[in-house]
Amino acid sequence: MDAEDTVFLFDVDNTLLDNDGVADDLRRHLTEEFGAERERRYWDEFERLREELGYADYLGALQRFRLAYPHDTHMLALSEWLVDYPFEERVYPGALELVASLRERGRPVILSDGDVVFQPRKVRRSGLWDAFGGDVLIYVHKERELDDVERRYPARRYVLVDDKIRVLAAVKAAWGERVTTVFPRQGHYAVDSQLLGRYPAPDVTIESIGDLRGLL
């Protein structure tokens, strides 16, 4: 594959899509269907699994949640709710227009973390898969897979847009001046003052993904 002049790498959750909003909807749904105690139990399982795996696994947490209540057949409806969630309604305003406009200056690519079932489903149902023309990479730990990213999408310059300042710092340390790091202040990671204080400032900070149009 010939090298592009610029490849734009976009995270998904809380970068292109309001994943905090999805989680809030899930909290309400769990409480309405199962009660507050079981809602808390689901998120306890979710956090334990994220600690083990290093990424969010909503369906994996549901499997563990089910083991705690093996005779509750209502769980089957919850799995359907998760898989069929209307993710297209959670894409941030201006995100799709931004991706379309960047095609004139380079190649937009999704670079995400996540599991092998739910995360691709989210990207497809949201419309992001089609918006990026199938240029989608999903790893367990994307900041550790930069050699594979370069092999698949060689470029003279990269632009990484991500709400996790930890990831931006790791990629900047690896690629140096070849990458411009962009930090949209969206989602809970982006406003965690303790987390922000641990890492160097990104190259560019914006308040919302739509603000990126015209800056690159």
Image (tube, rainbow, N blue to C red):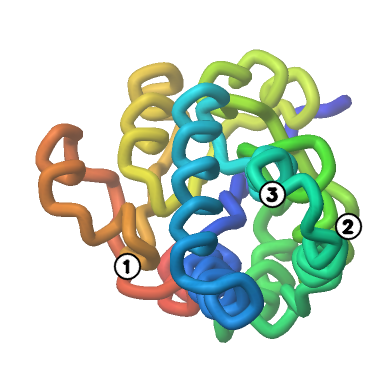
Say if 70 sits above or below 28 in the image. Answer: above
Q: Which residue position holds label 1?
A: 206
Q: Earlier in the sequence, mark 1 or mark 3?
A: 3
In depth, the one of 34 and 146 nearer the eye is: 34
Say if 88 sits above or below 40 in the image. Answer: below
Q: How many labels does the image show?
A: 3
In depth, the one of 81 and 190 nearer the eye is: 81
Indicate the amino acid at tag 3. Answer: Tyr
Q: Which of marks 1 and 2 is nearer the N terminus?
A: 2
The reply, left or right, for residue 123 in relation to residue 202 is right
Is residue 91 something one can see in this rendering?
Answer: no
Q: Earlier in the sequence, mark 2 or mark 3?
A: 3
| Residue 147: numbered disc | none
Say few, some or many: other residues with alpha carbon within 10 Å of mark 3 (under 14 / 14 to 19 / 20 or more).
few
Indicate the amino acid at tag 1. Answer: Ile
Say if 103 sits above or below 27 in the image. Answer: above
Q: How far apart are marks 1 and 3 (CA)?
A: 44 Å
